[in-house]
Image: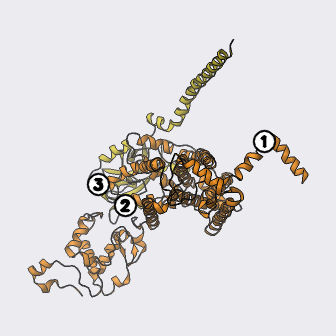
């Protein structure tokens, strides 16, 4: 056997080895990528949004806006207090409600309700909203995010489980329902 | 002495590192580069090593769990002996590192060091800036307090605006649907494994190229960089008039690095560690989150951009900035190095420095943020109440009760979001004041639904008194004609 033949044979074996490793690498990449994408894939199973109770209706007197909290449906044991989420409940007229996300529609800071001037104010960049959640002034491009709600057995339920952000399709849908009081 | 030599020889036979280390240390550098202007790169490396050491020390105690992180920081601050000092060193070290990296970049830019053949050194340097800022942001998250929690919310809100993939990117960033345990865990992995790994790799490549290509010579006006001749010219410069890096140049690096370490230690001992602030409990909404100093300029920018332009500028702006930085050595790879012959480069740097400095300064006082408790905690200055009628005083009560003070200041006290109202009666007459209050506009909410007629009348009466004594307030001249001048003569 000549040296040249031998070299090309070795070179072929190197390529074969690399090819073999490439296949194994690709096969390993699939579970790795799936593992990394688990927060996204989990969303499809519909666990992110569920009906959650905010408590009895008596907590929310007619014509007033009150702070309520709920526990996020998707939790890990080591989440600490981060699973407890606040929201603003407005009892419009005793029968109709509006439930606003705590997060400003600008960059997600917690908005505060001022009953005296009937305004929500954001401490970060000064976004302001009227009592019905519509934009009053400041940098937000839209009104406050709203949760879907239902009343069952004297309890107020909202559909929640995902932090509302300006780009969220779910949140956008809820935002369009903003009504004028 | 002989024993040491023998041990040294034993290792040298096996490692063979002595010769390359000696050669590297004593390699020739251009004489003028043994200068105090050439110490920032080594100082950045020194601070990075400090960050690694203090970071490992903190990791001995810190618990990267959303439920425990805040408590473990309290233990570090108050229970562990000198834990507060290690936290302070790490926190101040990060501030110094960002600052020194920026100064290093500025020096390299003004000295034309990015030109041929050091283009790749510059490109890796830009990557180093990005990963350094990445360390700063992820580190701020690990200090898992209210600022970190809501800062993550801001990050998520910005990410969500990316077209098409935004919502998925948010879930990927947060590790789930909300800011929770998974979020902190992945930022811990980023801050402790991924980003430092990149940083170490980039620093290695960066240093290797500095050694291989030689340190940038002192730029002389008129000494033009040409691809065809530069390498030869540089070689001649270092050979003819070079000095050994050790000890001629290195002593300044060592002294400056020591000075920086001392400064960090003094700041850490005097000012102490950063936070943690309030507990990361999202149901505590009495909070006004603000970012650490290296992102204050962004905080300011986000409040000044018009709402419609915000998303495109936020998403495209950084991409353009990075592309410009990366393209710089390929566009301007030849020519003058001296800042004395590059006026546009110098002016650009001045502009960037002034803009970033101004925005950072504004970000500290944050005049765009309402003072959330001004209405209940700040008094109306007494000079605005003395000798006023009952109606006007009632108006001042309306001013407080309706939170006007949160956005408008009186005598320098209160919110700066809206204009100060000390002289508002000079700008607007009575009708205009009422219109502004009722209808809002110009970034002010409309109060029409929230004020009854009596309150509006009282508030307008109070606002009409807000003008310097002895000066005539604004009035509607046409009304004077219609009603007769006597009836609307201004109150003195």
- Chain B colour as displayed: orange
Can you give x and y, in whole percent of width and height, for residue B136 in the image?
55, 54
Q: Tag 1, which secondary structure?
A: helix
Q: Considering depth in this image, is B98 or B351 the residue closer to the camera?
A: B351
- Chain A colour as displayed: yellow
Q: Mark 2 — residue?
A: B304
Quadrant location of the N terminus of chain A? top right
Q: Mark 3 — residue?
A: A93
Whole-angstrom CA distance, mark 3 to mark 2, is 38 Å
Residues at marks 1 and 3 touching, judged by CB atoms closer than 8 Å: no
Query: On the same chain: label 1 and label 3?
Result: no
User: Between disc 1 and disc 2, whose residue precedes?
Assistant: 1
Can you give x and y, in whole percent of width and height, for residue A70 in the image?
46, 49
Q: For this view, does B441 lie left or right of residue B147?
A: left
Which of the chains bears the disc numbered 1?
A: B
How packed mark 2 is, by other alpha carbons closer than 10 Å (few <14, some 14-19, many 20 or more), is: some
Q: Evaluate whether residue B289 shows in this view.
A: no
Quadrant location of the C terminus of chain A? bottom left
Q: Single out the mark in the foreground, 1 or 3.
A: 1
Q: Mark 1 — residue?
A: B15
């Amino acid at each position: 056997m000549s040296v040249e033949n031998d070299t090309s044979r070795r070179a072929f074996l190197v390529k074969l080895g690399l090819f073999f490793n490439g296949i194994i690498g690709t096969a390993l990449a699939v579970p790795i990528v799936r593992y990394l994408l688990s927060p996204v894939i989990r969303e499809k199973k519909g666990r992110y949004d569920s009906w959650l109770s905010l408590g009895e209706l008596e907590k929310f007197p007619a014509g007033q806006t009150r702070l309520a909290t709920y526990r996020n449906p998707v939790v890990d044991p080591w989440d600490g207090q981060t699973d407890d989420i606040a929201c603003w409940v407005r009892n419009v007229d005793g029968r109709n409600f509006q439930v606003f996300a705590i997060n400003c529609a600008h960059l997600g800071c917690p908005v505060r309700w001022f009953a005296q001037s009937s305004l929500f104010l954001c401490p970060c960049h000064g976004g302001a909203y009227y009592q019905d959640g519509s934009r009053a002034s400041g940098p937000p491009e839209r009104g406050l995010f709203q949760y879907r709600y239902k009343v069952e057995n004297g309890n107020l339920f909202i559909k929640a489980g995902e932090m509302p952000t300006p780009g969220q399709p779910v949140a956008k849908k809820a935002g369009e329902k903003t009504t004028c009081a | 002495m002989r024993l040491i030599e023998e041990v040294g020889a034993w290792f040298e036979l096996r490692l063979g590192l002595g010769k390359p280390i000696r050669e590297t240390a004593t390699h020739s550098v251009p004489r003028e580069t043994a200068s105090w202007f050439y110490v920032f790169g080594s100082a950045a490396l020194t601070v990075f090593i400090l960050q690694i050491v203090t970071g490992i020390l903190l990791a001995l105690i810190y618990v990267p769990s959303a439920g425990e992180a805040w408590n473990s920081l309290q233990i570090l601050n108050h229970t562990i002996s000198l834990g507060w000092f290690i936290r302070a060193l790490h926190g101040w070290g990060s501030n110094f590192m960002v600052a020194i990296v920026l100064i290093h970049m500025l020096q390299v830019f003004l000295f034309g060091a990015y030109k041929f053949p050091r283009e790749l050194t510059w490109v890796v340097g830009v990557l180093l800036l990005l990963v350094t800022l990445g360390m700063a942001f992820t580190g701020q998250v690990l200090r898992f307090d209210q600022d970190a929690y809501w800062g993550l919310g801001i990050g998520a809100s910005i990410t969500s605006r990316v077209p098409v993939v935004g919502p998925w990117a948010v879930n990927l960033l947060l590790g789930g649907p909300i800011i929770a345990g998974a979020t902190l865990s992945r930022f811990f992995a980023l801050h402790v494994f991924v980003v430092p790994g990149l940083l170490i790799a980039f620093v290695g490549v960066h240093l290797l190229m500095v050694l291989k290509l030689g340190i940038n010579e002192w730029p002389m006006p008129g000494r033009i960089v040409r691809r065809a001749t530069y390498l030869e010219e540089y070689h001649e410069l270092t050979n003819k008039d070079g000095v050994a890096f050790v000890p001629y140049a290195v002593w300044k690096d060592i002294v400056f690095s020591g000075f920086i370490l001392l400064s960090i230690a003094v700041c850490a001992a005097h000012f102490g560690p950063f936070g943690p602030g309030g507990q990361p409990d999202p149901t505590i909404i009495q909070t006004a989150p603000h970012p650490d100093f290296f992102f204050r300029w962004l905080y300011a920018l986000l409040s000044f951009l018009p709402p419609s332009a915000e998303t495109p500028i936020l998403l495209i702006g950084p991409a353009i900035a990075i592309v410009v930085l990366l393209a710089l050595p390929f566009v301007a790879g030849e020519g003058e190095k001296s800042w004395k012959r590059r006026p546009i480069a110098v002016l650009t740097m001045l502009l960037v420095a002034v803009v970033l400095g101004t925005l950072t300064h504004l970000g500290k006082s944050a005049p765009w943020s309402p003072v959330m408790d001004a209405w209940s905690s700040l008094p109306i200055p007494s000079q605005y109440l003395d000798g006023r009628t009952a109606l006007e005083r009632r108006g001042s009560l309306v001013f407080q009760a309706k939170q006007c003070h949160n956005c408008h200041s009186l005598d320098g006290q209160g919110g700066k979001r809206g204009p100060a109202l000390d002289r508002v009666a000079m700008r607007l007459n009575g009708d205009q004041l009422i219109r502004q209050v009722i209808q809002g506009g110009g970034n002010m909410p409309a109060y029409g639904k929230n004020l009854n007629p009596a309150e509006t009348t009282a508030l307008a009466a109070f606002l009409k008194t807000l003008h310097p004594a002895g000066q005539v307030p604004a009035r509607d001249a046409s009304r004077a004609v219609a009603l007769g001048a006597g009836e609307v003569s201004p109150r003195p």
